[in-house]
Image (cartoon, helix red, strand yellow):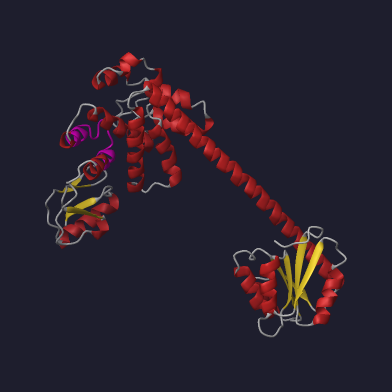
Amino acid sequence: MMNNKAKPYTILVVDDDEAQISLVAQVLSADQRLNIITATDGKDALKKAEMHEPHIIISDYYMPGMDGAQLCQRIKQHAILRERMFIMLTSASAVQEKVKLLESGADELLTKPIHPDELVSRVEASLRIVILQQDLKKEQQKLSEANEQLNESYQGMLDLLTILVGIHVTDAAKHAEEAKKIVAWFGEKLQMTPDEQQPIMSAAALHEIGKINIPEEILQKEGKNFYAREHGHFPVAGYLLLSRIPKLADVGLIIRHQLENYDGSGFPDRLMKEEIPIGSRILRGINYLEHIAADGMETEKMIEALHKVQGTLLDTMIVQLMEEYILTTKTKDWINDKTTVTVLELAAGMTLAADLTTGSGTKLLPKDTVMTPTLVKKIMAHNQFDPIIGSVFVYR
């Protein structure tokens, strides 16, 4: 902004009557804070406004070419100038005419002939608003910088903790990366907001942090023995570590409940069904996937194993989405002759390339079913009260 440093506030006075400009400038020049610039038409005023970025614009309404209302509209639509205070000078006395000027964006109306005291009072009131806007912007900038520092600090802390886990726990870094990919995929499928997904993503990165307190010889044991003997230990240990860090308290809770079973038989608090946070239910699926993958299972066997624990260890919805994740990301050739559609895109003539199952686990139609108008109508109706969560696969 091209302001005189000794006069921090710039006022642009616009009028096709030079005598009127001189009067306004003379009255305002008594205030040593004000730098007065002038223009005699709307076009020149807009050019000078862009050049000087005045804090207040005082413009006559009746001018040849671009009038005061049109100038005001241009100013209020301008990316940089739209927050500038605009005082309109008018000799109009009709209420409807004044309303029209205010609707154009004018912040104040000043009736001509101008009384010097009223002019000074209106400008003073506008300056108070300008100063408040400046103070607000400064506070917003401070908050933005503080928030950025917090985010950097938060991410730095996560990175440090992730490295710490990787040092103490074999394959933890690999598990963390895969877990974050799964959470990102689930987040998209479940249409999570960034705020909903962020703590689950952090929990995925740190889900094995509780294992740093477990002796190496126990960690090196076979997966089955480890889960049988240490089920309730590492999630609670991880929760206790993170609960001392205020910004990670919600992440700690997700980690605490990551081995709760959907039927209430899990650890440490034997929560069941929707009592278990959605993030913890996703982590339960991730933990189970890590567990069976450690046994070297083939893809088909992994999916079979997931189905065996559906409704007991794992939420049915989690199993469905986990199966879809495995098929579409781990099985290169599976998707080649298939495509995905939404439930609303299902149409007669399409052939299902996988079983059609609802979020509650109800199997509506088997693989290879050819859709008919009647079937489509029934699926749409059922989807209203028992939605299909995953993708619908059909043959190309």
Residue 318: in magenta span: yes
Residue 7 left/right relative to 197: right
Image vertical order of residue 14 relative to residue 214, above or below: below
Q: Residue at x 28, y 49 (%)?
A: 387
Quick check: can you spot residue 114?
no
Q: Which image quarter: residue 150?
A: top right
Residue 138 left/right relative to 267: right
Q: Residue at x 28, y 21 (%)?
A: 227
Magenta residues, as a range? 302-321
Q: Position of residue 123 (x, y in %)?
A: 79, 65
Front in this rendered view, residue 223 or 109: 223
Quick check: can you spot residue 110?
yes
Which secondary structure dominates the residues rendered in magenta?
Answer: helix
Q: Residue at x 79, y 82 (%)?
A: 17
Q: Position of residue 147 (x, y in %)?
A: 57, 42
Tell me the quadrant of the picture where the C terminus can be found: bottom left
Q: Position of residue 262 (x, y in %)?
A: 30, 32
Residue 313: in magenta span: yes
Q: Position of residue 20 (x, y in %)?
A: 82, 79
Q: Residue furthest right?
A: 30
